[in-house]
Structures are given as structure tokens and as C-alpha cells.
Image: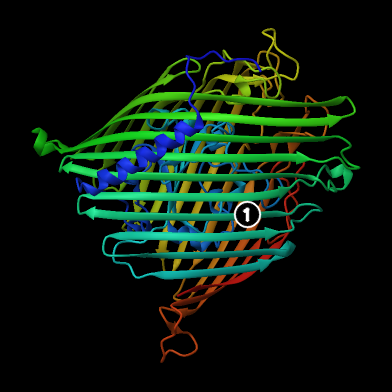
Amino acid sequence: MQGISRRPGKFPIRLKRSLFVLSLATLILMGGACLAGAQSAAPEEELYLDPITVTATRTPERVSDVADSVEVFGPERIESLLPGDMLDFLSEGAGVILPQASGRGGQASLFLRGSESNFTSVMIDGFKLTFPDGSAYDFGHLSPEWVGAAEILKGPQSPLYGSDAASGVMNFIPDIGKPGESPSFTVRARGGSDETFEEAFKLKGGTARSGYAASLSRLDTEGHLPNDGYYRTVGTAALDHFFSDNAKLRFLYHANRNRYDIPGPAHAGFREPNKYGRNTEQLIGARAHLKPFPWLEYIPRVSLYLRDTLFENKADAISPGSDKTDTSGTRLHLDNQVNVRQSGKQLGLSALRRSISTLGVEWETEDISIKSAYENDFGSGENEYDSDRRATSFYAQQQFQFQNGFTLAGGVRADNFDVGEDETTGKLSASYKIPGTGARIRGAVGEGIKRPSFAELLDVYGPGNPNLKSERQKSREVGFDQFFANNKLKFSATYYVNEIDDLIAYSFEPFENGTNYENIQKARVKGAELSLSLLDFHDFSAHASFNTMDTVALETGGLGAPNYVEGEELLRRPDWWWSASVSYHPDRLRASLRVNSVSERWDIDDSQPWPYPRVVNPGFTRVDLGLSLDVVKDRISMFDRTRKSKVKDLTVEFKVNNALDEEYEAVYGYAAPGIQWFAGVRAVF
């Protein structure tokens, strides 16, 4: 294995786990000291079009007080679509391009505002879920039953969240009970097309000082192609404990184990019998929220992420050779955040409503281990790779909210990497509420970075390049928001420009430096987002977004994969796409209609020899329908309103995906399923 340029020192996994346990114990003791109380977004706030966001600034703020582009999916919006996977509602987001290869369990990569698929940081409640090896996160395995809200923060967020957030952040917030909340137990079961069965169980409630939630779900499906089976088991547990009015501790555990068969190429009839992948991931996190003084908050976090991925293709008639790759990765992350909140009166500034200063230091270590073996007509062999890297980062952010409706925020971050060059990033955003109009204008400029992945640094898929620089994205945007009808109707428009530099190119044939990777590519993305949201107007709610995008590869160096061809558009980025959903929810009935339309776009044909040729993937329109009926609601049956039921809620559900049986390929060469139906029941005790 080729070595990588680094500062000396090795950090064994045993020491990492010891540090994690020590940090977790410290958090518990700190919480027990009763120094401070936590602030969190109230669930009822998420019912409004001006919800609370905790992702945009690392502090709970109303969306209308945040100058960055952020979109919040509340529980009502999520549940109205009867989602079976996160993709069922995430693809509604403005600026979101989230194509999935084939059906359920197929790889789904996010191109947020046209940026690279590994430029978005993925989190659960602020704890990093992004893959430690630096590759793109696969959204195809995320289940929705434990989610209370989701937030999409757009634009470079590296100053607040580090190198994984070069184009934005996607944060999933678990649905946790509140202190004093009566316990409830939810059972959900569905069945439908392709021998699909889904089961989910959820316990939620609270005690005098705690709130808790635990969920377990299982999905099994045979898929719509031969050898297209998929299963997923997901467990999540969360606990909030208030030691006093001034101290809160949150604990989170999330585990996901899934296995997907790989059908093989279309020309072979999708009958590859012995090719599959398996993933197992675990996230353990703890966070305290402490307030020793009315103006001071201290928020320490610690998390441990573990992931193991197995890919195996056994010898058979379709594939005479065999290969197997087992990849494991870990991340230990420590974060210490301090917020200083002061009013304008305290500072002696009558024009200032409030000031929020945020300072923090992060430390993380990531390691990767890859074991591979192959056997074919040309021979056999085994390879093993093992490496780790660390980062220490300092970040600062200042927010000013003025009495006249003007908001200003600026942030900066300094990253000290033991592998590669140190980096400094920054961003500046501002907004202004026009008095008496319900209108707001906003703008932001910033820069994000993405560290090279382990595969790009090491000799994993060909000679790696230990001297690679971080990929960079500079962005600027301007936007307009207009609220109508007491904040029940919101219109938004945003125009943005992303300039992406030092992109890492892969070449099947080595570059002049003898490696398969080099920082030689550059691209530009220009786009516009229009969105309209309506909340509860005569029992109707609606959300719609229309997106346009212009992409171009500016420089390629003449080498590399066909992802970048100088002067041509980027792959899998459509020129336009739109999504709209309408739900009707009188009393016991909820009906939803969702339409997603995508223009033609460039892709690659990976069934051909390398370098894969570029092809045009035709556009498509997909229509989904959902219907649910509360047979029992608040213990009152629709058949007998004189007696109270032992079941709190009993709901019958029916859903149809791709109702018009559209033939399309979200990813070229991977046919999406035709019309699919699912029916089931949900009971709350």
C-alpha cells in the first residue's frame, strides 16, 4: 500500500472507544451537576410555515430569522405522504436531486443544488451519519418511522459543520416524547407489490423529568426484477433527561442493517444469482445542554459511528470470476460549543434586538479498513488496506438581529488536518424583513471544502494520490420570501451560483504522476428555485417547487472519467424538475396526491467498456397516491361514537406509487418499478 503524507501518530480503535466511554460518562456527570437547561424546537412549531430550525445556525431559530436557505419537513408534511422510505418525501425538497438506481434498496445519491454527491453532510440530531471513508452517502436505506422532522440546509456550510458540508447539510430529527407525556405504543403493518412486507413498532412517552422514544422496523421485498430482493432492519432509541430546569442530557442510538441483491445487467436478463451487498451501521451519541448563566450556554457532544460494508460476487454462469470486498470504518467525534446570548439592551444598543455569539472546537478521528479478494481467468489475489486520519477544528459564528428586521450572520472555521493541507473557510449571510409587507429578501456568500476520500488517497481502486488537495465550492445566492394569510401561505424564490474547483478526477490509466487521481477539474452550476407552500386552507395543504439548473464542466485536464467533459453538462443534473403534493385532511380522512417530473439529463452507460459512454436519459413524470382513514380517533370509533375504544387510534392506509405505470430510469440502465400498491393498518395504544 502506498503511504500517505501525514504527521506521525496512530490512534487505535480500542483507545477511541475508551475515549468515547470516558466522554460519555463526563457528559452524564455534567448533566447531573444541574448547570443549565436545554432549548429545543417545540413540536407544535413545526406545524407552521415559519418553523424552528436547529441546523441553520446551530441554535434554535425561526426560519424567518435565518438568512441561509433552509427547508423544514414537519411531521404533518411527512406523514401525509405515507412514506415507506425517506426518499418518498425528501425528493420534494427544492434544489434536491436524489435519483435511485432501480427499486427499494437501490443506491440513491444526493446532488444538492447540482453539487457533488459527497458534498452534503448527513446527520441524525446533529450527530454525523456521513460515511467515514469520504464517499457519497446512500439514502436508499433510510427508514422514516422514527423521524419527527427533517431539515435541508443549502449552500456551503463547512464553516459550521466541516469538510463534509461543502454544499449543505441534511439533518434528521427523531420524534421523542416530552416530560409528562403519556406513554403510547404504535404498531404499523403493510403489505403489497413484489411480496413486500413492512412492520414497525414505536414506543414514545415521558416521565416527570424525562422523554423517551424507541422504534424497531423491518422491511422485506422480493423486488421487481429477478434476484432483486432487499431487507432492512432499523432500530432507534432516544432519551432526554432534565436534571433540573437548567440541565438536559440527550442520548441517541441508531442501528441499520440491510442486504440487497444485485440483479445483474439487462442484456443477461437481470439473472445474476450470486451478487449482493450488505451494510451495517451504528451511531451512538450523547449531548448535554447546559446554561450556567442566563446569557451562557455550553453544549458538549460526543458520538461514535461504526460501519461495515460487504460486497460479494460469487462465481456463476453470468460471472465466471469472483470477488469480495469487506470495508469497515469508524468515526469518533467530539464537539464543544459555547453560545453567548445578549440583548441589545444589555449591550446598550437600542437598534439591536439580540446578539448570539457561537464558539466551538471539534476533534474527530476516522479510520478505514478494506479487505478484498478476487479470482478470475487472469489470476487471483488478496489486498488489505488500513489507515486513519484526524482533524482538529475551531469555528466561530456571530449573529445580529436588529429591531428593524435586518439580520446579519458570519462564520469562520479553521481545520487542522493531519493528512493534507490545513483549511480555512468562511461565510456571510444577511436578510431584511420589509415592514408591513410579509416580505423578506436574503443573500449569502460562502465557501466549502471536501477532504479527499480514503480511496482517492490510498491504493484501493488503483494508485492513490497522497498529495491531493481538498475540493472547493464557492457559492453565492440571493432570495426572496413572501408570507400571506397569517403565515398560512409562503412563496420563495432563490437564485444561486456554485463554482466548484480542484475537483478530483479519476482516470483508468494513471496520470503523469503515476496515480489514478488528480485535482484537475472545475465546474460551475447556476440554478433557480421557486417554491409555494399552503398550510391547512379549508382542510387542504400543498407544497410545490420548480427548479431550473445550468451546469457546465469548465476544465477537465483532458483525462478522467466521463463525469466531466469540458464544455458539457454534468451527469444526472436535469435542466429542470418540479414536484408538487396536495393533501386533503378533513377530520378522519387524509388523501394525498404527489407528482414529480424530471427533464432529460446526461448519464453514463456503465454496461459498456471503460470509459463509459455518455448517454441522454429521457425525462419522466411519476404520480403517487395516498389514502388513510381513522377508523378510531382519540378512542372514538367512526361506527360507535357512544363508547370509548381500548385503542387510542386505528388507521387504515392505502398507497400507490407510480400510479400511471410510467416506464423510466432515474439512473440510466436501472429500470424503476412500475405501478406498486401497499395497504396496511396503524394502531396506537
Name the amino acid, label 1: Arg
Residue 661, given in percent of the width and then of the height, sits at 73, 59
Count neighbours of disc 1 (C-alpha within 10 A) and say few if under 14, some if 14 to 19, many if 20 or more: many
Looking at the image, residue 228 lies above or below residue 328: below
Q: Nearer the viewer, residue 185 or 590?
A: 185
Give the side of residue 55 with respect to residue 406, left or right: right
Name the residue that disc number 1 marks: 232
Give me the residue at 67% from left, 52% from top: 104
Residue 237 occupies quadrant: bottom left
Label 1 sits on a secondary structure element that is strand
The x, y position of residue 460, in whole percent, is: 68, 24
Q: Would you say 2 lies left or right of 77 here?
A: right
- Residue 20: x %, y % from top left: 41, 38
The quarter of the image holding the C terminus is bottom left
Q: Residue at x 47, y 47 (%)?
A: 531
Is any part of residue 404 visible from this angle?
A: no
449 relative to 106 in the view: left or right: left
User: How many badges with numbers are in the image?
Assistant: 1
Q: Residue furthest top?
A: 512
